[in-house]
Amino acid sequence: MTVRRVMFVDDEPNLLAGLRRMLRFKRDDWEMEFAEGGEQALARLAERPFDVVVSDMRMPGMDGGQLLAHVRRLYPRTARVILSGHADRAAIISAVGPTQQYLAKPCEVDVLVGVLDRVLAVRDLIVDDALADLLGGVESLPKPPQVYEEMLAISTDPDCALGDVVAVIERDLGTSAEVLRLVNTAFFGLPSEVTTIARAVSLLGLETIQALAVAGAVFAAGGPPPPGVDTRQLSERGMRVGQLSRRLAVEEGWSRQSVGDAFFAGMLHDVGLPVLAGADPRAWAAVRAVSCPDLADQVEVEVARLGCTVTQAGAYLLGLWGFSEPVVEAIAMQPTDPDAPDALPAALLLTFARRAVCHPDAPQRAAATGYLTPERLERWQGIALGVLTLADDAA
């Protein structure tokens, strides 16, 4: 088993000693180092690679946000986590770009271990070093410039309403993903997952949204959308897949959490596409030039041209950003064969929803034995017909 390297950074030796004691039971899984401040952390990173850096926010000299900005630039493959107190919301906003996850202090050991175990597990999705550097170094997803312009205008309008903010965010996949990532971080300590933009905006509050816009965090362009990528179309497609996935999960009687995860997986399954397309526009043009009648055919083309699939890249990003394991797994396993022995219901549901929305003429196949029985497939097809017909009529 691969032993992962994790570095904890804090300017208070007593806190580092406490972490060392509490995490002693992870010694067989993690090789841990404890650095007293940002300068010492960077010196140790220069000596050998680390899989994750977990840093306190408030430190003299170089604070946690500044440290992680250096880590992102010099060692993009190293995952970056901030520990911060609830009073540090302004500092969190300043650290949005280089930080992938946020944890509130004091942090329960099981929460910290759970976050780090999930981050470390997702690293195996991308084995190509250049791709891992590319995805790990993402500071902000590509977005249309008008998103930032509209959010900046809203931030200075004393009469703006929550609905105005929600409408702007929902029109762009990258912005939606980053807002949901921020509100669902453990820093906010919410009792349940937030699965809608309206709820996310309500919980963050207009004051925080306005501060993010003025600071250029979350809503900044992050580079123009790559050639051949229609971000509006991408968002609309993700929303349709997400809505169908949610409806199917409800009809299956899944738990509220699982229904929310199904919606997230559907809405965000293409979140890696703008990053891959922007990194190599020629390769993306070659992918687009090949007509693939089904998702399984698309996999071969994407791997050959891009080095991984769009969904693998998306799962990698979402895993680094702290989205739940079921969401990451469902996206990473795309497309899922109904007869595969390890086929998860959530992954099968997402594959069905993607085909129904993106390849409506492609035949859908049931399993000889397994979750997606012929009866369940027939039921899903009836639900999809109703949901997508209503969506088409509304459009």
Image (spheres, rainbow, N blue to C red):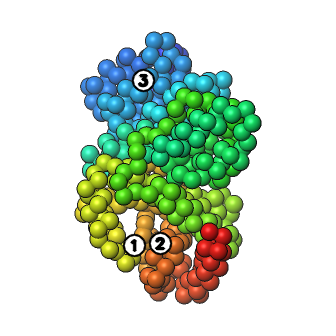
Q: Residues within 10 Å of mark 3 (few under 14, many from 20)?
A: many
- Which label lies toward us, 3 or 1? 1
* Disc 2 element: helix
Which amino acid, by three-letter code, is at mark 3? Leu
* Whether label 3 touches label 1, CB < 8 Å: no
Label 3 element class: helix
Q: CA distance from mark 3 to mark 1?
A: 41 Å
Q: Position of residue 219 (x, y in %)?
A: 53, 39
Amino acid at circle 1 = Leu
N-terminal label among 3 and 1: 3
Q: Residue at x 64, y 37 (%)?
A: 154
Image quadrant in which you'd find residue 229: bottom left
The answer to whether one can see residue 91 in this image is yes
Assess whether mark 2 and mark 1 are in contact (beta carbons under 8 angstroms).
yes
Q: Are marks 3 and 2 in contact (CB under 8 Å)?
A: no
Circle 3 is placed at which residue position? 67
Which residue is painted at 72% across and 44% down in the image?
Answer: 162
On the image, the x and y values in percent for residue 71 come to: 37, 29
Name the disc covering residue 322, or none: none
